[in-house]
Image: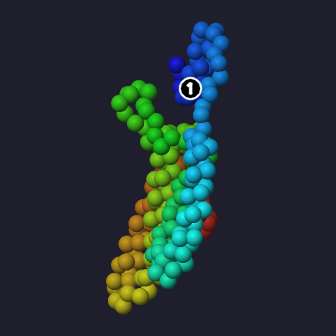
Amino acid sequence: MSQSEFPRSAEGMVLFVQAKTKQKFAAIERPPPISRTQMWFLVAAFLATTPFIIKKLIAPDSPLREPIVWCSMAILVYFFSVSGGMHNIIRSMPLFMHDRNHPGKLIFFYQGSGMQLGTEGFVVGFLYTVVGLLLGFLTHFAPQIRSKLAQRIVMLLAIAISFLAVRKVISLDNWKTGYWIHAFWPSRWT
């Protein structure tokens, strides 16, 4: 059974067996994950606990009043955005796939622009997040360092790490798509 011909689900198996045996099968019935009684219980529990949750959230010592929580959530949203998390969810992209030539091995990076695995997006998103965090560090915390030598060392280190991260993103894109980025210098610079 070729992986590309039929989906990997019960319906796909039925289609495969129908194609091979020419037999008719009844529709596959799937019960809902939550019964009607369970749904009403969850709604009642939610309505009963909502006032207590709201009281906890608006209290003066609430976790929502901590800047660290908001900063962490902003970083997570940024990572989710640049890693293509929504693309992976919408297209149901797997994080990895099994190698057809070596069944015991996993493939995390797929060469070719026709398909993207979830791990590829997470690696690129991590590299972009590192560059963004270093930029934020340089603009907010590096100016507070008293020593000019320490400032320069921190800035050069951050620039070097950012350069390596962006270079790795570009090389992954070149490896995946086959397109190379060329520098176009002004004619009087050459």
40 lies above or below 46: above
Residue ID at (41%, 26%): 101
Determine which quarter of the picture holds residue 35: top right
Residue ID at (61%, 66%): 186
Q: Amino acid at mark 1?
A: Ala
Image coords of residue 88 (percent x, y): 56, 47
Q: Which of 37 and 110 lies nearest the eye of the viewer?
A: 37
Image coords of residue 165 (percent x, y): 44, 60
Image coords of residue 148 (percent x, y): 37, 88
Q: Which of 149 and 11 lies nearest the eye of the viewer?
A: 11
Q: Which class describes the residues within 10 Å of circle 1: few (<14), some (14-19), or many (20+)?
A: few
- Element under disc 1: helix
In the image, farthest residue toward the bottom = 146
Residue of label 1: 10
Q: Is residue 139 visible?
A: no
Q: Which of 76 and 107 lies nearest the eye of the viewer?
A: 76
Residue ID at (60%, 31%): 30
